[in-house]
């Protein structure tokens, strides 16, 4: 009798502990969701007044963003949007092949010792501050691009793409490596047993089997690239014109916000318009990340 | 004598008991940042216990910070706009600390030596796009300029361009970046504060004439003083409300012979005697008294 009472008490206190830990984590999870919803609400709330004076068609389709104009303020984000997309897609063209290659090497080919060195090195790459990468863009990458393309300077979309590609690499490599690791061993063994070489196995079996994870990795890397500010601000030259070529100087949405938010008068149309640019940026990264999440989940169900 | 002792004891007590409040925050113009930094360093070496922090960010950013109460002094290379003055909560005090001969720079290899104000305006409006139209070689002009939060951006637009800048202008992050770009871009042109052209050998400062047929002048001390150089401008410092004693002392130091020597060492030009008197009057001081006091301090030290 006494014994069972004791047991009951123990299980009660255990249950209580469990419940409180459960509650604690629940609160944390809800808090994160609230922060996200809060940021979204704030962006919507602060950007709405902008559309009292700017029509949505002007905002989306006008190519001229010049709120401090000498003549007439204009608030079109199209050229900034195109610039952002050019730089981001360029970054992916650069980072995805290198990232997949590096990940395949680390997960499938490298010896244990090499892997132990390579993995932390990739992670360290992620911790380099964006200002430093931007500086490298100005002093190292820029002059080289200028020489190769015979341009007056190397502050252009390609420079931004290369730097953002470098910044997206750690995300892409780590997640691709995870995806490759989770490919069932039986696939690899079957392929090798059929007489395929290591190279054929990686290219024809392992990478296709991990493709949804790799796509998700690419998407997340892209999300990082779209939102990056300091590096593009320093390295892309920031010209307002609509880009017609990858060697043009471009100004991305993030640069415009970073440059102008510091001096804008509170509660002016310009101020609200900058938040509207932020909202557009948020929606793009949100869509990209959501797509990555959906693709990633699909893979796990398979 | 007594005043000095009181002053010194004040310095110590505020230094010990109110470290944070005795710290002077200066923010703003990228053109002024280096010069004011040197002034602050020399001042802190002279009066131990005083702390002054100087940061850049652009004139617009400095003025916005002053209006928001997050800095004590705003450096500005343009006059404060009426719109900004009306949003200020208290009276704005304006002091001129130096004069700048806003310099137009090109690469050393460029054959062009002089430009008229009109030509300069046309270049930056995008109406002249090739150096051959100006007597140079047949190469397209690469335009370098500043970002909209820069006072230099504003001043140059107001006095030279008189319209919106061409969209091809690459918006650089500061004077130094423009100099850096023009150093390597043989087809480049840029505008920077006179203090930034001193040590660069690969660039050339152009002579500017007021109109076609008139003599062109370089931004030298004599030409700026006699107002022969057409794009010289005052460099301002703004404070808001009653000026704190600490701030007042620092401003007086900047205007003193020693302070003005630093201003010229940094490549800018000294203010006129009349301006000096007006500045001191704003601080509630008289020129002779301050100079005397400085001499007394010097005598005491030796």
Image (cartoon, rainbow, N blue to C red):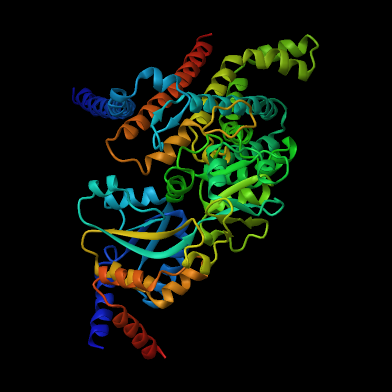
The quadrant the C terminus of chain A occupies is: top right
Which residue occupies 57% across, 39% down? A237
Residue B63, image x and y in percent? 33, 51
Residue sitting nearer the eye, A147 or B277: B277
Q: Is residue B159 above or below residue A122?
A: below
Q: Residue at x 60, y 51 (%)?
A: B115
Q: In the rendered image of this protein, does residue B32 appear above or below residue B127?
A: below
Can you tell which quarter of the image residue A62 is in? top left
The reply to whether residue A172 is in sight is yes
Looking at the figure, which quarter contains the N terminus of chain A?
A: top left
Question: Where is residue A201, by image quadrant?
Answer: top right
Q: Nearer the viewer, residue B274 or A91?
A: B274
* Residue A129 is at least partly visible in this image: no
Left or right placement of residue A286 versus residue B190 in this view: left
- The image quarter in which residue A241 lies: top right
Left or right relative to A182: residue A283: left
Q: Is residue A270 or residue A166 the one in the foreground?
A: A270
Q: Position of residue A28 (x, y in %)?
A: 31, 30
Q: Horizontal placement of A69 versus A107: left or right?
A: left
Name above or below for residue B189 compared with residue A275. below
| Drawn side of residue A68 relative to residue A130, left or right | left
Residue placed furthest toward the front: B213
Position in image of residue B108 (x %, y %): 69, 54
How many numbered circles does the render carry? 0
């Amino acid at each position: 009798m006494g014994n069972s009472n004791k047991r009951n008490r123990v299980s009660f206190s255990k249950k209580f502990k469990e419940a409180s830990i459960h509650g604690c984590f629940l609160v944390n999870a809800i808090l994160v969701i609230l922060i996200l919803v809060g940021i979204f609400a704030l962006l919507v709330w602060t950007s709405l007044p902008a559309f009292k004076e700017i029509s949505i068609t002007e905002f989306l389709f006008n190519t001229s963003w010049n709120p401090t104009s000498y003549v007439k303020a204009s608030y079109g984000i199209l050229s900034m949007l195109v610039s952002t997309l050019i730089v981001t897609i360029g970054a992916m063209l650069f980072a995805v092949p290198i990232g997949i290659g590096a990940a395949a090497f680390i997960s499938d080919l490298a010896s244990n010792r090499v892997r132990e060195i390579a993995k932390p090195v990739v992670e360290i790459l992620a911790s380099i501050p964006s200002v430093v990468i931007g500086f490298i863009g100005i002093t190292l990458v820029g002059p080289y691009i200028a020489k190769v393309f015979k341009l007056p300077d190397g502050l252009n979309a390609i420079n931004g793409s290369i730097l953002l590609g470098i910044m997206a690499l750690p995300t892409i490599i780590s997640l691709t490596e995870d995806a490759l690791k989770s490919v069932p061993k039986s696939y690899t063994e079957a392929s090798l047993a059929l007489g395929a070489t290591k190279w054929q196995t990686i290219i024809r079996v392992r990478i296709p089997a991990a493709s949804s994870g790799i796509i998700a990795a690419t998407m997340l890397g892209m999300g990082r690239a779209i939102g990056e500010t300091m590096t593009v601000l320093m390295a892309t030259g920031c010209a307002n014109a609509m880009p017609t070529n990858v060697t043009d100087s471009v100004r991305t949405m993030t640069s415009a916000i970073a440059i102008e938010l510091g001096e804008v008068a509170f509660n002016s149309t310009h101020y609200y318009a900058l938040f509207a640019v932020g909202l557009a940026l948020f929606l793009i990264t949100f869509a990209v990340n959501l797509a990555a999440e959906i693709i990633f989940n699909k893979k796990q169900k398979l | 004598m007594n005043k000095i002792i009181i002053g010194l004891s004040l310095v110590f007590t505020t230094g010990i008991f109110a470290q944070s409040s005795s710290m002077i925050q200066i923010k703003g113009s990228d053109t002024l940042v280096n010069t004011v930094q040197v002034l602050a360093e020399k001042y802190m070496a002279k009066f131990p216990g005083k702390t002054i922090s100087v940061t850049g960010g652009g004139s617009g950013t400095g003025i916005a910070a002053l209006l928001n109460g997050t800095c004590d002094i705003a450096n500005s290379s343009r006059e404060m706009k009426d719109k900004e003055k009306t949003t200020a909560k208290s009276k704005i005090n304006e002091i001129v600390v130096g004069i700048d001969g806003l310099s137009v720079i090109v690469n050393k290899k460029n054959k062009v030596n002089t430009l008229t104000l009109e030509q300069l305006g046309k270049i930056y409006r995008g109406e002249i796009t090739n150096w051959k139209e100006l007597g140079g070689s047949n190469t397209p002009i690469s335009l370098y300029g500043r970002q909209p939060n820069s006072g230099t951006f504003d001043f140059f637009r107001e006095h030279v361009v008189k319209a919106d800048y061409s969209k091809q202008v690459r918006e650089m992050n500061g004077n130094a970046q423009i100099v850096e770009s023009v150093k390597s871009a043989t087809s480049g042109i840029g505008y920077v504060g006179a203090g930034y052209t001193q040590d660069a050998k690969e660039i050339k400062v152009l002579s500017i004439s007021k109109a076609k047929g008139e003599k062109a002048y370089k931004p030298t001390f004599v030409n700026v003083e006699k107002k022969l150089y057409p794009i010289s401008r005052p460099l301002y410092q703004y404070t808001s409300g009653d000026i704190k004693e600490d701030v007042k002392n620092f401003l007086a130091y900047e205007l003193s012979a020693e302070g003005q020597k630093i201003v010229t060492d940094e490549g800018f030009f000294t203010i006129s005697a009349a301006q000096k008197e007006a500045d001191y009057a704003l601080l509630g001081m008289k020129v002779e008294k301050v100079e005397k006091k400085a001499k007394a301090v010097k005598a005491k030290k030796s």
